[in-house]
Amino acid sequence: MEKLGFIGLGVMGKPMCRNLIRAGYSLVVYDIVKDAVQELASEGAQAANSPAMVAELCDKIITMLPNSPQVREVLLGPDGVITKVRPGSIIIDTSSIAPLAAREIAAELAKKQVRMLDAPVSGGQAGAVKGTLSIMVGGDAAVFEQCRQILGSVGSSVIRVGEIGAGNTAKLTNQTIVAINIAAIAEGMTLAVKAGVDPSAVFEAIRGGSAGSKMLEAKTPLMLAQKFDPGFRLALHIKDLANVLETGKEVGAPLPLASMVMEMMQELKADNYADCDNSVLAKYYEKLSGKPIGLPGE
Ligand code: NAD
């Protein structure tokens, strides 16, 4: 049984671990939240006390952490993977972080002959539970081939898009399109509501046409029911758009729509909606129009 380390046992990490255990891997797990570690230990994983201990026990390690600072700390920090990792080991970072950070972290690890893939995912908690995530991978092609089977145990689409950092560039592209898409849905539905037409009927009428999309299917019902439990937390989408805008500046990409949606999201955060699903963008339009898109319970 191949041994794998897994660090970051949150909304996404925990179900990914369960799928890896199901696929026959022997896991060593760590999180700063001890309950999460204990939960997986009771399901057959081995508990570790630190990222360094994970590195002592495994030479392939997956991370699923919130953002670049946590990935840096876990991999390069004083009690981090780098302190005990063996040459030839492979790190697969599945967190969504800035592409520049991924390249910088990989360069530090390379000094210890450790290779890294950046492999962020899309598909949400449901995809993590079902093992049907879409995984966008950056890094060396040979290292990717060595990890393809592992990634195939948590995702149904595993695509290498380029060298290290390219995985997160693909993820930021995804998050840009998703954010603008959700704002477009809220704006369109607000037009229907203000015109006095039932938004549920509009949804039924347009979902099979040119405006139909995965986002329309996933987010419109939440807006209609005014039910904004996450799902994908607004705070995480703000984190992604911050990385989008920073990367846009670095590479000279114009991002007027992403900038505008970021402003909407920041205002919602100020209104205490940071822990809601990103479909809460509907509330931004409600504030401007004076009318909600749906009624609770619809
Ligand atoms: P989460 O906050 O639920 O989980 C993150 C985990 O990392 C937590 O258990 C936390 O305790 C742990 N952690 C934080 N700092 C740590 C440290 N220093 N050492 C060890 N553990 C630490 O977040 P999530 O929803 O699982 O998302 C993880 C990543 O996946 C994020 O980058 C997110 O943007 C991305 N993502 C999330 C979703 C989603 O729908 N939730 C979908 C796609 C991608």
Image: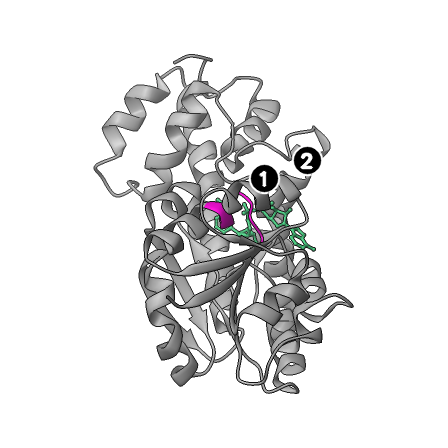
Residue 96's disc number: none
Q: Residue at x 35, y 78 (%)?
A: 145
Residue in the foreground of this view, choosing between 109 and 97: 109
Q: Taken as a whole, is the magenta stretch helix, strand or loop?
A: loop
- Quadrant housing residue 276: top right
Name the amino acid, label 2: Lys
Q: Which residue is drawn at 53% across and 17% down?
A: 291
Which quarter of the figure is the C terminus placed in? Answer: top left
Q: Which residue is drawn at 56% across and 23% down?
A: 286
Which quarter of the figure is the N terminus placed in? Answer: bottom left
SS label for mark 2 = helix
Q: Does the magenta stretch include residue 296?
A: no
Q: Is residue 12 magenta?
A: yes
Indicate left or right for 242 with 227 as reference. right
Disc 2 + disc 1, Cβ < 8 Å: yes
SS label for mark 1 = helix
Magenta extent: 8-14
Query: What is the crowding at mark 2: few (fewer than 14 residues within 10 Å), some, or many (at least 20)?
Result: some
- Quadrant housing residue 215: top left
> What is the distance, in whole Å, between disc 2 and disc 1 at their CAs?
8 Å
Q: Which residue is under mark 2?
A: 269
Name the amino acid, label 1: Leu
For marks 2 and 1 on the same chain, the one whose residue lies earlier in the sequence: 1
Indicate left or right for 258 with 143 as reference. right
Asked if one can make out residue 145 in the rendered structure from this viewpoint, the answer is yes
Residue 234's disc number: 1
291 versus 216 height, above or below: above
Indicate left or right for 262 with 77 as reference. left
Residue 287's x, y, as percent?
61, 24
127 versus 200 height, above or below: below
